Amino acid sequence: MTKDAVIAILKKETGYISGEKIGQALGISRAAVNTAVRTLRREGYEIQSSTNKGYRLTTALDTLHTGDLMALLSPERMTSIECLDCVESTNRSLQLRALEGAPEGQIVLAGEQIDGRGRRGRRFYSPPKKGIYLSYLLRPQELPSDVTTITAWTAVAISRAIGQVCGITPQIKWVNDLYLHNKKIAGILTEMSIESESGHIQYVIIGIGLNVSQKADDFPEELLSSAGSLFSETGTRYPRAALAAAIIGELDQLRADWPQKKAAYLDAYRSSSIMMQKEIVILNQKDSKSAVVTGISDDFGLCVTYPDGSSEVLQGGEVSIRF
């Protein structure tokens, strides 16, 4: 849309830019530029205008619209990014696009999820204008058993993206959660579709939910003691568009690195782990067992020791940390 292209140009400029230059860049008339500016103002953007100078963006909104990302990513990358205000679930939306033949690297990004999901069918709290809810499509050629560590790689990628924008490094809770100050700020849900006849992967969808702007008391009562956001844990408000662009960049890098750069991701995963030497409870369907974490294995498994002295490497499952 014209307004997205206009706001992208205004965000890139530090001073005034004339309506004529904007029009020339976009191949539209000055009247069309003026119409787009009026629309953006109605949406809440503060845009100054001055005779003989043009337009200048003075206050930007913390939005995740197409124009916000156009100011940060290349035109080529934007061709496979869909920005939506609200969806049932970004993973479900991307699944439909994957079945329709969407290319690897296709992204669905939303500012709100009505039915966001976490592991084991849990609901992921996804309020409007507070977080980043993003799903990323992969079409790996490996067998299903060879891509089981993709969630761990993704945790490293998201941690790196947060570090780029915020200058902080979250800790990783095995296998798919990011924490700050013992509060969960992000979760990852990876889903895979496999051809029944060949056993080959049709697609892998990486779903990411990152809490960005929530205050401590914004969370539902059942999450108050366990959930946090970048803002609630640091007191600083970070722009969601910049975070989303950094996440996309790191996921693109992950796609390029997979699977040759395993050692670098494994080292980063180990160094960021919140699990080391922690007492945990391993949650099973029938019972639960206590253990102490002793390490992360070379295939991203969780090394644990039980009270009787026996040990095991967990390759999957649910664990609870005793902070």
Image: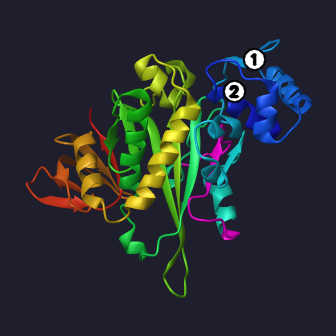
Helix, strand or loop at label 1? It is strand
Range covered by the magenta-colored residues: 99-117
Q: Quadrant of residue 213?
A: top right
Q: Is residue 55 above or below residue 198?
A: above
The x, y position of residue 148, in whole percent, is 38, 65
Outermost residue, front direction?
Answer: 52
Q: Name the one closer to the observer, 90 or 7.
A: 7
**Numbered label tally:** 2
Residue contact between numbered discs 1 and 2, judged by CB atoms under 8 Å:
yes
- Seen at 28% across and 48% down, the residue is 269
Q: CA distance from mark 1 to mark 2?
A: 9 Å
Q: Quadrant of the N terminus?
A: top right
Q: Which numbered circle lies on residue 47?
A: 1
Asked if the stretch drawn in magenta spans residue 104, the answer is: yes
Up/down of 93 relative to 215, above or below = below
Q: Residue at x 22, y 43 (%)?
A: 271
Which of the labelled discs sits on residue 10, or is there none? 2
The image shows residue 38 at horizontal and vertical percentages of: 86, 23
Q: Residues within 10 Å of mark 1 (few under 14, many from 20)?
A: some
Residue lying at 42% horizontally and 43% vertically, measured from the top left: 158
Q: Secondary structure at mark 2?
A: helix
Is 249 inside the magenta-drawn segment?
no
Give 124 or 287, whichever is nearer the viewer. 124
Q: Quadrant of the C terminus?
A: top left
Compared with 26, 43 (above or below) is above
Amino acid type, mark 2: Leu
